[in-house]
């Protein structure tokens, strides 16, 4: 780390000692030099604000000068004595990544511009620091972050961070197996999870007892590190909502959603800074949604505190999602710009021989042509953030959070939970979720909101309709 110039111990953390001086405290400015620079976080790909930058005189090691980077990662020393220095910085992110302060040698010259660029190393070097040496051909990555209290912002130790994804394997045929990795936060609220599939989008959330965040998507770079911080609210934010129905205890148990005293406001823009009225805005895991007014504004109240995913949708436009940190008895703000139109594709005719091993898709097309139920094809799903967000807009369908990662598809007509099938196999809603399947892996979805229109193959004793998902192979 020191490039052979200085033992790391000599690079001291900032203190109140008189030897640690700001540029303004330098007594003798004769022949001094001005130094400017930036601090960059190569893992998050953004400037690093609030970094405590230190320049230590290489000759004596006793003279230290300090500055703090601004919101753009910029720092400056107005009057630094010319000479050789060891430059570095301290920031909570450096500790989070399990690294030592990266140092570099700097020569400061009077009368000329002195520019210094400091940075947290890229994801590849950071991954080695976190997880040890990796196979060169390995695309595995890691996720690192902190869990804090949503209101006090203090670290939470003993919280679990759960990451889920679908692992696709070839065992005679392509199969997808749900995978889960869990890590527990240390005394500083820090967690680290290695061995995750790189170049993929995973789903993660934080939980401690009944306190939990929402589920957010995290993209892990191949052979690199992703950072994802969470906040979670107090235990009073979790309540059970019983539907007004006679469907029985099972649905009431499955309809646990999150509530609290947080508020979310915002605006949804369209093209050229125009606003979008009647856009739908929803917060995952809460079952709460609303529509924008004539000025494109929205307000959602009764939300739980913590980290959640917010999604905005409008007819004819690609949806957008954002991660927000909600605080009790307070209002957060978010803005969306839905500037990408969803183009309807012209009808085309494809000539060829259909594959003989996909009779399920043939049956899907026959049922679609019959006109019973609601059908979504791969074209309909190409801009969908998740399966639940795609079928949420189907008349008679409601999406409810059912636990840590799962969701229930409730049919309004019967007010009961639909049965989910994936490639003809019944899904267990307590351990698996329709949102575990990336939309780009789906060939088609059929939704039956009533038992009368449900094909016999997908009829169950509950008679509550069905959602049938067919994946691509």
Image: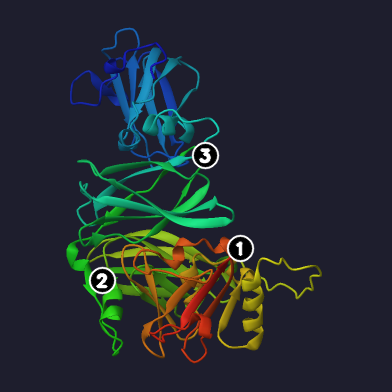
Label pair 2/1, CB-CB below 8 angstroms: no
Q: How is the image coloured?
A: rainbow
Residue at 58% of width from left, 88% of height from top?
Answer: 372
Q: Residue furthest front?
A: 172
Label 2: which residue?
A: 259
Q: Position of residue 87 (x, y in %)?
A: 38, 21
Q: Nearer the viewer, mark 1 or mark 3?
A: 1
Q: Quadrant of the C terminus?
A: bottom right
SS state under label 1: loop
The span from disc 1 to disc 3 (Cα, nearest Å) is: 23 Å
Label 3: which residue?
A: 139
Residue at 50% of width from left, 18% of height from top?
Answer: 112
Label 1: which residue?
A: 472
Residue at 49% of width from left, 85% of height from top?
Answer: 395
Label pair 1/3, CB-CB below 8 angstroms: no
The span from disc 2 to disc 1 (Cα, nearest Å) is: 37 Å
Q: Position of residue 72 (x, y in %)?
A: 43, 41
- From where the camera sits, is residue 389 visible? no
Task: Work out whether 366 lies above or below 74.
Answer: below
Q: Nearer the viewer, mark 2 or mark 1?
A: 1
- Which mark is drawn over residue 210? none
Task: Work out whether 229 lies above or below 111.
Answer: below
Q: Dot 3: within a 10 Å radius of its alpha carbon, few (fewer than 14), some, or many (20 or more) residues?
A: some
Q: Which callout, 1 or 3, points at the residue further toward the start of the chain?
A: 3
SS state under label 3: loop
The span from disc 2 to disc 3 (Cα, nearest Å) is: 39 Å
- Please tell me which residue lies in front, 22 or 17: 17
Task: Work out whether 155 lies above or below 382.
Answer: above
Task: Work out whether 324 lies above or below 401.
Answer: above
Is residue 236 rendered to the left or right of residue 263?
left
Where residue 1 sits, quadrant-wise, is: top left
Q: Which callout, 2 or 3, points at the residue further toward the start of the chain?
A: 3
């Amino acid at each position: 780390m020191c490039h052979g110039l200085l033992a790391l111990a000599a690079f001291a953390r900032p203190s109140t000692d008189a030897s640690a001086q700001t540029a303004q405290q330098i007594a003798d400015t004769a022949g001094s030099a001005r130094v400017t620079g930036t601090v960059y976080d190569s893992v998050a790909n953004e400037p690093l604000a609030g970094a405590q930058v230190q320049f230590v005189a290489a000759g004596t090691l006793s003279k230290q000068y300090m500055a703090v980077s601004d919101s753009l990662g910029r720092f400056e020393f107005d009057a630094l004595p010319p000479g050789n220095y060891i430059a570095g910085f301290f920031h909570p992110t450096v500790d989070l990544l399990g690294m030592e302060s990266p140092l570099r040698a700097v020569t400061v010259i009077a009368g000329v511009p002195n520019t210094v660029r400091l940075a947290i190393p890229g994801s590849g070097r950071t991954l080695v620091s976190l997880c040890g040496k990796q196979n060169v051909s390995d695309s595995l990555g890691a996720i690192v972050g902190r869990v804090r209290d949503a209101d006090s912002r203090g670290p939470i130790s003993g919280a679990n961070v759960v990451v889920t994804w679908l692992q696709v394997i070839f065992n005679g045929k392509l199969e997808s197996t749900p995978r889960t990795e869990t890590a527990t936060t240390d005394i500083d609220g820090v967690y680290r999870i290695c061995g995750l599939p790189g170049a993929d989008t995973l789903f993660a959330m934080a939980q401690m007892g009944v306190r939990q965040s929402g589920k957010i998507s995290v993209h892990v770079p191949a052979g690199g590190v992703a950072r994802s911080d969470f906040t979670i609210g107090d235990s009073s934010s979790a309540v059970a909502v019983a539907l007004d129905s006679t469907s029985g205890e099972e649905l009431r148990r499955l309809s646990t959603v999150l509530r609290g005293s947080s508020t979310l406001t915002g605006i949804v823009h369209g093209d050229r800074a125009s606003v979008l009225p009647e856009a739908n805005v929803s917060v995952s895991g809460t079952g709460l949604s609303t529509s924008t007014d004539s000025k494109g504004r929205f307000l959602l109240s009764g939300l739980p505190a913590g980290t959640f995913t917010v999604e905005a949708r409008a007819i004819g436009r690609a949806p957008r999602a954002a991660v927000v940190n909600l605080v009790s008895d307070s209002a957060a703000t978010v803005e969306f710009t839905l500037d990408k139109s969803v183009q309807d594709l012209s009808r085309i005719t494809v000539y060829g021989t259909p594959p003989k091993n996909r009779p399920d898709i043939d049956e899907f097309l026959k049922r679609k042509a019959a006109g019973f139920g609601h059908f979504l094809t791969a074209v309909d799903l190409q801009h969908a953030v998740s399966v639940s967000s795609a079928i949420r807009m189907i008349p008679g369908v409601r999406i409810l959070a059912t636990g840590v990662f799962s969701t229930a598809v409730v049919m309004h007509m019967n007010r009961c939970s639909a049965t989910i099938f994936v490639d003809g196999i019944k899904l267990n809603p307590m351990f698996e979720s329709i949102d575990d399947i990336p939309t780009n892996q789906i060939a088609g979805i059929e939704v039956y909101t009533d038992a009368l229109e449900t094909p016999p193959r997908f009829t169950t004793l509950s008679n509550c309709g069905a959602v049938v998902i067919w994946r691509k192979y």
